[in-house]
Amino acid sequence: MTTHAIHLDTSLAWAKGGYTVQVHLGSDRAPAHLVLDTGSSTLAVSPGAYNPERDATLAATPWAQDIQYGGGAWAGPVLRSSLALGEGRHARRIDDALFALIETPGELFRQAHGIFGLAYRALDPAHDISGLLQQRGVQPALSWPWRLGADAASLRTEILQQPRVDLTPAFSALEEEGVVRDQFALLVQRAVVHVQAEGLSDHALAADPLNRGTLVLGGGVEEQSLYHGGFQDIRVVHDLYYNAHLRGLSVGDGPRVAAPPLAAKDVDRHGSNALLDTGSSFLVLEASLYAAVMAAFAAHDARLPALVERFGAAFKTGQGLPNHAIDHRHWPDLHLHFESPTGGDTAVRIAASHYWPHNALNAGQALFLLMPGLAHFPSQSILGLPLFAGRYAVFDRRAGGLGTVRLAQGRRP
């Protein structure tokens, strides 16, 4: 079987703050736009995009998933059917992919239809609910058709008490079946959808070149048409997520501020003090690092903290600040310092235009994409799309140790 790389178009148009890829599920090739997330491993789709009753290749399982994110949760049955990606010479298919059908309501993904997790196997847990179904007189004891209700919060404890099953994530299945090599790459332009004018449809947003990207399954540094210049390499220190060791950050030409280590009590569950997460629209900085950035902004220009405060008030109503209020020339670059694969230091620059993008979500408005970790979060930074904006990022899971994430300057798709 060929292991040539698969090039897939991606878009910010559907999820607005995340890139989606179109896949086709089942015998009728139902199209679904799924958010690409390196912070999870689950493949899940909403009933609005996929109808199991129309899928002649569907096989039900006794498994269910209950997945919780920082901003919501969902539950539903695990199904087995075909998964197809790409067109023409980039078309590939596997016939026994595992994915969940989201049966609990919610708008976790905006206009996207679900999620395509690209992380490791440990983040794709399911639970065998056959015993629970038998207690309720359900025969055969399969999770679909779904009979457990639509309230994710009330279902959570009940499902999680059932025996755990670790599923094979879709990307891992593609690699294990010899469809692609154990690496993928993302070309990212922005962190949040570019809206040139109000009232544009999702399809009009998808036609905007600034909202386009590329996913290359099985591809990496050989895809030279997607980047230029050299790579900056970040060592993956744990394969729970794409965990990195963040050594510190600096603002503009200021001194480097050390990043605190992850607390020992959190290491088993969270891996390290930073994770590289394309499912996040923000750079969520550990609280002391965020405070250091705000202090550095004030030292750089006393007017800057007030603009951040103004944005916070506006964002509570779903608005940003007017583009003209944010002149990128007045805001310093950020520099994140990571451990490299050789033990050295890799400093990654994030320009103000990527953490304060203009025309973001709303035409004529700028969004501030830095935020502090919540009080109940571990001492960890969740480094989302502003880190990747303007870059071609290779997630090479074959590299020595646990892998390497490589960043180069991206070319527009």
Image: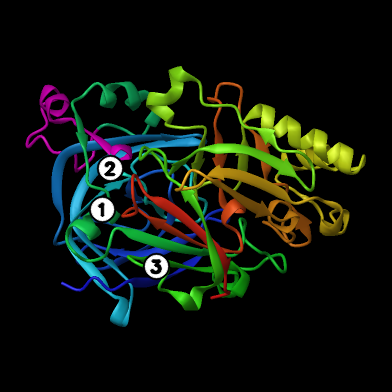
Furthest-right residue in this view: 302
Q: Is residue 317 visible?
A: no
**Residue annotated with mark 2:** 121
Q: Say left or right for 179 vs 201.
A: left
Q: Are marks 1 and 2 in contact (CB under 8 Å)?
A: yes
Numbered range of the magenta stretch = 122-147
At a point 23% along the width and 39% down the height, the residue shown is: 146
**Dot 3 crowding, Cα within 10 Å, few <14, some 14–19, many 20+:** many
Amino acid of disc 1: Ser
Mark earlier in primary sequence (3, 2) = 2
Q: Secondary structure at mark 3?
A: strand
Q: Position of residue 169 (x, y in %)?
A: 27, 49
**Dot 1 crowding, Cα within 10 Å, few <14, some 14–19, many 20+:** many
Which of 148 and 190 lies nearest the eye of the viewer? 190
Q: Secondary structure at mark 2?
A: helix
Q: Is 143 covered by the magenta stretch?
A: yes
**Dot 2 crowding, Cα within 10 Å, few <14, some 14–19, many 20+:** many
Q: Position of residue 296 (x, y in %)?
A: 81, 38
**Residue annotated with mark 1:** 172
Q: Position of residue 47 (x, y in %)?
A: 34, 52
Q: Examine the image and state in which quarter residue 237 appears.
A: top left
Q: Position of residue 110 (x, y in %)?
A: 52, 51
Q: Is 180 covered by the magenta stretch?
A: no
Q: Which mark is residue 216?
A: 3
Q: CA distance from mark 3 to mark 1?
A: 14 Å
Amino acid of disc 3: Val
Q: Secondary structure at mark 1?
A: helix
Mark earlier in primary sequence (3, 1) = 1
Q: CA distance from mark 3 to mark 2?
A: 20 Å
Colour treatment of the image: rainbow
Which of 188 and 345 lies nearest the eye of the viewer? 345
